[in-house]
Image: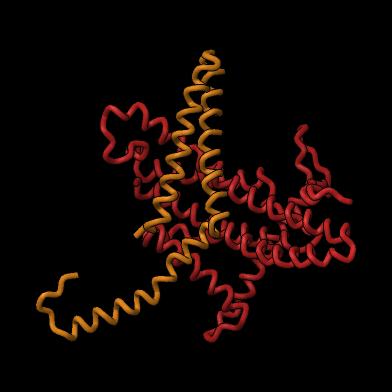
Chain colours: A red, B orange
Amino acid sequence: MASPLEQFEIKPIIPIEIGGVDVSFTNSSLWMTIAVVVAGGTLAIAAGRGAMVPGRLQTVAELFYEFIAGLIKETIGAQGRKYFPIIFTVFAFVLTGNLLGMIPYSFTFTSHIIVTFAMAIVIFIAVTVLGFVKHGMHFFTFFVPPGTPLVMYPLMIPIEILSYLSRPISLAVRLFANMMAGHILLKVIAGFVAAMGVFGILPLALVVALTGLELIIAFLQAYVFTILTCLYINDALHLH
Amino acid sequence: MSEPEKPTSLEDLNRRLKDVRSKHAPDEPEKDGAGSSGGLGLGFRVAIDLVAGVAVGVFVGWLLDRWLGTTPWLMVLFFFLGAGAGFTNVLRAERASRNPPE
């Protein structure tokens, strides 16, 4: 029986090597490209018509637009409008990646920590730069929680800085761990279907239920990733 | 909400508003629940936040140790600071989910 971890294997499709660095076009790259094409293409087609009375596809696109716009208004406020493009892109990319991963024999790039960590670290650095641009050196007051007595500064400032530094890790690990755990679980339970013969109907039912759960998680984790991005931008803009 | 001598129409409006709001209220915890996907999601989140704090603390301590040649003391110190940061993360996330940002 195939290992439940086999699905995460990276296979180079077009081997490329530049200066001793392996930059092959892998199945992971392929699915990322597919995600970009699918997300971009769907939205382009949906928005292209621009009908007064939206069709099915346009309704979905408008739903997503309003969902993210509402999320930004809730978490950042009116100032957040400027950041709509990046937030919507992050959401669309993660969501499409998660959902494409639900297709049998596909590859879930969001289940690789290097992918989620790369996104998280870019967001982290961008948000930090944004904080410095908006507030200059004043940004450092972010590491002093309001109402801290002076005696506690030597303890609180390192803790706050470490807490800030742990953001990209928890952002990346949350998405990666959820996606990986779900996909392993599906594969393990599915393995029982064949192994148990007639009684395989039980794990089969479970797999069906879990597939539904995984679809929810795919949405949920894209949402969580997006809302955390919004909260970080909000922190950088408003400091506390 | 003290309404000592407000006209009844306003009181009535108030009551109707409250009714509508309470009808919409179940929306909010559900939205919060969606963010954490119930107990399992919450546990997952807390665990990741905690571990992330400790991991970053240890990593920063290890880097400083290597730089300053004080192995292993700064790593020990930053382990505890990182644990503190992890708890801060959890507390803050929990507080934010209890009373969502206005």
Relative to B59, residue A229 above or below:
below
**Camera sees residue A225:** no
Residue at (58% x, 49% y) in the render = A174
Name the outermost residue toward the left: B5
Relative to B27, residue A158 above or below:
above
Foreground pick, B18 / B74: B18
Q: Relative to residue B13, is residue A177 drawn left or right?
A: right
Hey, which quadrant is residue B17 in on the image? bottom left
**Camera sees residue A101:** yes
Residue A11, how many percent across, how many down?
Answer: 82, 47
Residue A141, how many percent across, how many down?
Answer: 33, 37
Residue at (35% x, 46% y) in the render = A239
Name the outermost residue toward the front: A199
Relative to B44, residue A220 above or below:
below
Task: Report how many numbered discs are placed on residues in the image.
Answer: 0
Foreground pick, A222 / A186: A186
Residue at (41% x, 30% y) in the render = A158
Name the outermost residue toward the top: B69
Residue at (40% x, 56% y) in the render = B98
Residue B69, how many percent across, how many down?
Answer: 54, 13
Residue A161, how many percent across, how many down?
Answer: 43, 34
Hey, which quadrant is residue A138 in on the image? top left
Relative to A118, residue A88 above or below:
below
Foreground pick, A128 / A44: A128
